Amino acid sequence: MDLETFRSETREWLEENCPQSMRNRTFNFEDAHEVYSTDDAKIWLKRMAARGWTAPTWPTEYGGAGFDYETNRVFQEEMAAIKALPGSTGMGLAMIGPTLLEYGTEEQKMRHLPKIVSGEVTWCQGYSEPGSGSDLASLQTKAVLDGDQFILNGQKIWTSGAQYADWMFALVRTDFEAAKHDGISFVLLDMHQPGVTIKPILLISGSSPFCETFFDNAVARSDDLVSELNKGWSVGKRLLQFERSAAPSRAKKKGRPVNAYAKTAKQYIGESDGKVADPLAREKIVKQTMTEKSLQLTVRRVFEESKSGKAPGATTSIFKLIGSTLAKEGAALQSELRGTSGAGWEGEGFSEDEFDACHNWLRDRAVTIYGGTNEVQMNIISKRVLGLPD
């Protein structure tokens, strides 16, 4: 099928099948479970999954649509044209799915990927531990091979969405005698078992997207070891590249169009001759939007270069550093442009939009920490890009 025919048919199908409630929606990742728990969201997921459109670039044998770059580009353009939310979202699609496509056995791919596409199974990440965040390789959660299963004991922290997840991908220590990077394995485990305890963490924003997760003789199947025993560090790093590559798109998922800053400023500061009245505000808006656009273009360029099959490497750290900084600064700017109206937490005298601006400002102060702190990203860039000594 040629691209124009595909575009026409896709446009018609989306218009007929995408529920109105799944259009023009914006949300932060913290709210994804609530957004995707509605009846309309479940209908939308079922329709999209039936066509493989929840994971459009994944191979068809695993439930995807098998789109090449150009076909996917047209598909994404038509989704954006009606401002449709994707059929599904989360770590299954963004992180563990791509990792299994690269490192998983055929049995692992067939067992896990179709359930991610259909939305039957949701995932969380078991990486950070108390005392092992920035220095992740010092992790101490222990996994002992016992017959055809691993027995896990230890603790993970900042496990996003663990209270809703069905499965976890985790880094565990399987050799305490080896150098710390060499004794780590990458395993998958079912969260619905007696040995797993989850405790949500309440944040300053008032939400609890992160959790503490405790393992007390929890079990992971030996055939859910990804790659080789004690070779999980390479798998874990590759997954982080997928995560960090997604960082620049977070602001877009929250529905922050290029002119949103100017729209806010005109509403709260005023305008003169069609421009934001305050020149200092104009300068801040221009700087923010130009940097966001530059990052989008850079991500697209690197994506094109990566089609040769070469992993993006340290460029993902650049994306994480700049993308998370822009997300935090963008939320702060949206609140600042509202003046005192951008500081409303609760009570009378504020609109829902103003409450959202304040909550987003507080919430997005954390994006430069989770997924690898900005300091860690700068260390990676200094060593691997600039070639500076340790």
Image (cartoon, helix red, strand yellow):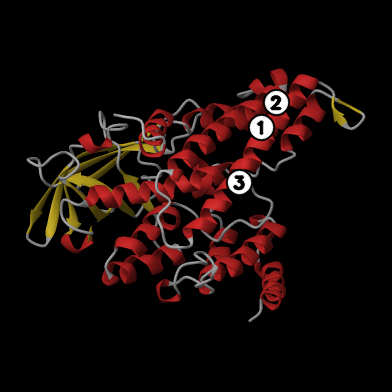
- Amino acid identity at mark 3: Gln
Question: Mark 2 — residue?
Answer: 284
Instruction: Please tell me which of labels 3 and 2 falls first in the chain.
Output: 2
Instruction: Give the residue drawn at x 31%, y 69%.
Output: 111
Secondary structure beneath label 2: helix
User: Is 101 in front, or is 294?
Assistant: 294
Across and down, in percent, residue 183 comes to 15, 45
Q: Amino acid at mark 1?
A: Gln
Residue pointed to by mark 3: 296
Question: Residue placed at 70% from the left, 18% from the top?
Answer: 340
Q: Is residue 351 visible?
A: no
Horizontal relation, residue 228 to residue 88: left or right = left
Q: Mark 1 sits on what residue? A: 288
Split into 4 quadrants, where in the image is the N terminus? bottom right
Q: How packed is label 2: few (under 14 Cα within 10 Å), some, or many (20 or more)?
A: some
Spatial separation of the CA atoms under disc 1 and disc 2: 6 Å
Q: Residues within 10 Å of mark 3 (few under 14, many from 20)?
A: some
**Decide: marks 1, 2 in contact (CB < 8 A)?**
yes
239 to the left or right of 298: left
Label 1 sits on a secondary structure element that is: helix
For badge 2, the amino acid type reads Lys
Q: Is residue 260 left or right of residue 379?
A: right
Q: The residue tagged with tag 3: helix, strand or loop? A: helix
The residues tagged by marks 3 and 2 sit, at their Cα atoms, a distance apart of: 19 Å
